[in-house]
Image (cartoon, grey):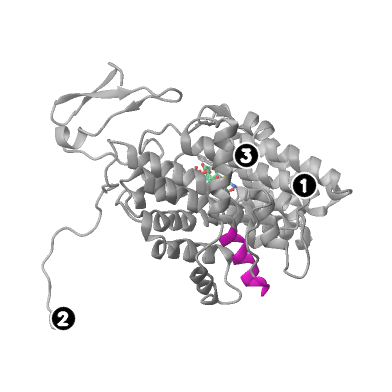
Amino acid sequence: MTSKTVTLTDNATGKVIELPVHEGSHGPDCIDIRSLYKELGYFTYDPGFMSTASCSSAVTFIDGSEGTLLYRGYPIEQLAAQSTYLEVCYLLLNGDLPSSDELHDFSRIIKEHSMMHEAVRGFYDGFRHDAHPMAIMVGVVGALSAFYHDATDVHNPEHRKISAHRLISKMPTIAAWSYKYANGQPFMYPQNRLSYTGNFLAMMFGVPTSTYEPDPTFVRALDLILILHADHEQNASTSTVRLSGSSEANPFAAISAGIASLWGPLHGGANEKVVMMLEDIVHSGKTVEEFVARAKDKDDPFRLMGFGHRVYKNYDPRAKIIREMTHKLLAEMGGGEHDPLFEVALKLEKIALEDEYFVERKLYPNVDFYSGIILRAMGIPLNMFTVIFALARTVGWISHWNEMMQDPESRIGRPRQLYTGSKTRDYIAIEDR
Ligand code: CMC
């Protein structure tokens, strides 16, 4: 809190009020409008939260014009180059990097919780064979709220910690099983001998009839993808988790709500849509330029998937890292960089970065533009892309939920509205209508 204020004059009544201004450690200051309605009788109007900070948070910082992303103050570039996903999980949850003992203990705890109650298996059978794995994720993660009754007090920090560990730990199992179910293959159980990421790959691609050893290059690539997706401050899914959790709902149910929000193509679902769009371009016989023209046409709802971002008006720093990794991985795989899909992606990127429409609107490729390409190159099926995003983001969601539950300023989320419906009118009996 600073002594800075903003003075607001209501031109209709002449009433003047002073609103306090809060200064963060980075980023724009925030005008505290909590007394506005009481003092002047107005609400603020901000659909899509274009200028609204819904909370204060110490987890993640983004500077959209600079293209900066910090987890607990650490630049994403440094974490991507030097850290591991589990270490990043510890950092996001606890606020600081762990000592080696702390990391060792944390990894052990996460491994210990990776199995699920056997009854959870039964939930999968309720889904159609062709259910989208994200639909299964929403259902099964929500269903976890019917288990684990030993840690349901959301005001108890120890209970919250156990729920956080369970979620991070079980998410790879839930995700891999959603894939196995759709493929009619037996579910694979977690193996504690493997790393967090290696274990996920083993549960996805392994079968009981043979031993599966995850490829170290893929393990590192996937680990990096998980790091890059681990948190992104108050995006749609995180805000959904916060809003649903603000009523003191069960954390598994709140995370399930976050998964539902993430699924949309404007958010995490974009990684799947990017590859679908690239495939469409390759197979349509049309040129990349024709697709770019469609994206610019206001009468055509088509958008270039993987381009644009509410906050980044510069290159998404995650996209830069994945872009480089995509080049490396495809080259290592031998000839991968000549994949027609990748070639179309590069062409699209080049055209869009030079086109006035995209330049003017500061529409850069976002993380989803490249993550789909790299996941595809690793043999991950298309419908699992957003599931992997959900797996990675779980730690971000739960860190924000935990922060909110500890914040003395947090209250049940209850936005107001600008009502535009009918004025009060009298009921008319049906025979008189
Ligand atoms: N293709 C063509 N035009 C676009 C695109 C695009 N991908 N994105 C934005 N625009 C245009 C939009 O039509 C508008 O133009 P105008 O000012 O003439 O009306 C302008 O750019 C601003 O767009 P907006 O929709 O008002 O911006 P927003 O902040 O509400 O939406 C967005 C951000 C990410 C939803 C949007 O850019 C989009 O739909 N992108 C494609 C989907 C996508 O890649 N999503 C992944 C986001 S990153 C990862 C994540 O969040 O999970």
Q: Residue furthest bottom?
A: 431
**In the image, is residue 126 above or below residue 149?**
below
Label 3 lies in ligand 1 vicinity (Cβ under 8 Å): yes
User: What amino acid type should be assigned to the residue bearing mark 3?
Assistant: Phe
Return the mark for residue 430.
2
Q: Tag 2's secondary structure? A: helix
Q: Residues within 10 Å of mark 3 (few under 14, many from 20)?
A: some
Quadrant of the image containing the C terminus:
bottom left
The numbered disc on residue 346 is none
Q: Tell me if residue 236 can be seen.
A: no
Image: 264 above or below 183: above
The answer as to whether callout 1 falls within 8 Å of ligand 1 is no
Q: Position of residue 295 (x, y in %)?
A: 62, 50
Q: Quadrant of ligand 1?
A: top right
Q: Secondary structure at mark 1?
A: helix
Residue 303 lies, with reference to residue 11, above or below; the image says below
Q: Nearer the viewer, mark 1 or mark 3?
A: 1
N-term mark: 1 or 3:
1
Q: Tell me the kind of residue under disc 1.
A: Pro
The residue that appears at 51% across and 45% down in the rendered structure is 395
Magenta stretch: give its range.
Answer: 173-186
